Image: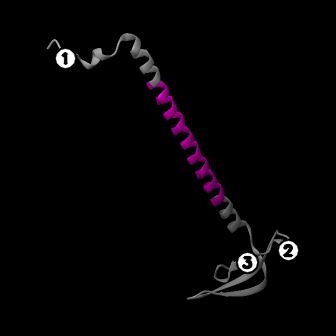
Amino acid sequence: MGGSRSPIRWFEARDVKPLEVELVKDAQDKVRCIQAKLLAAQSRQKKYADHKVRDMEFQTEEEPIAILDRDVRKLRTKEIKSVKVQWKHRPVKEVTWEAEKDM
């Protein structure tokens, strides 16, 4: 028994403090990293939610007043019919192309 030493005795008292400080610094770095990731995720979610709200406002507040043109785009397996729409409360230069089925 005389030759084995307990792992607890491997460190001198003066060595323990720098190790503890290093562990605390490492933990603080990890916390900062997690906080940054959470903020980035929250920011992405807010942008997504804001975009959804804008889409809903657009759908409920905008009203088509005239169809100015029509177009059919042919893909391999289907045709997509589109209409050029003038919207109420918007200048003529802000017309948009929309799927005919949505109008």
For badge 3, the amino acid type reads: Trp
Element type where label 2 sits in the image: helix
Q: Secondary structure at mark 3?
A: strand
- Locate residue 101: give its quadrant: bottom right
Where, quadrant-wise, is the N terminus in this rendering? top left
**Local crowd size for mark 2, using a 10 Å CA cut-off: few (<14), some (14–19), many (≥20):** few
Question: Sequence-wise, which precedes: disc 2 or disc 3?
Answer: 2
The answer for how far apart the CA atoms under marks 1 and 3 are is: 82 Å
Q: In this rendering, which labeled residue sits more in front, label 2 or label 3?
A: 3
> N-terminal of the two: label 1 or label 3?
1
Residue picked out by circle 3: 97
Residue nearest the viewer, comparing 65 with 25: 25
Q: Are marks 2 and 1 in contact (CB under 8 Å)?
A: no
* Residue at 73% in and 83% down: 83
**Please, what is the three-letter code of the amino acid marked with disc 1?**
Ser
Residues in magenta? 23-52
- Using the numbered discs, state the Cα–Cα distance from disc 2 to disc 3 in whole angstroms: 13 Å
- Does 97 appear above or below 17? below
Q: Residue at x 50, y 29 (%)?
A: 28
Q: Is residue 69 magenta?
A: no
Mark number, residue 4: 1
Secondary structure mostly seen in the magenta stretch: helix
Where in the figure is residue 3, as x and y percent of width and height? Answer: 18, 14
Question: What distance separates the C-alpha of mark 2 from that of mark 1?
Answer: 89 Å
Crowd rating for badge 1 (residues with CA inside 10 Å; few <14, some 14–19, many 20+): few
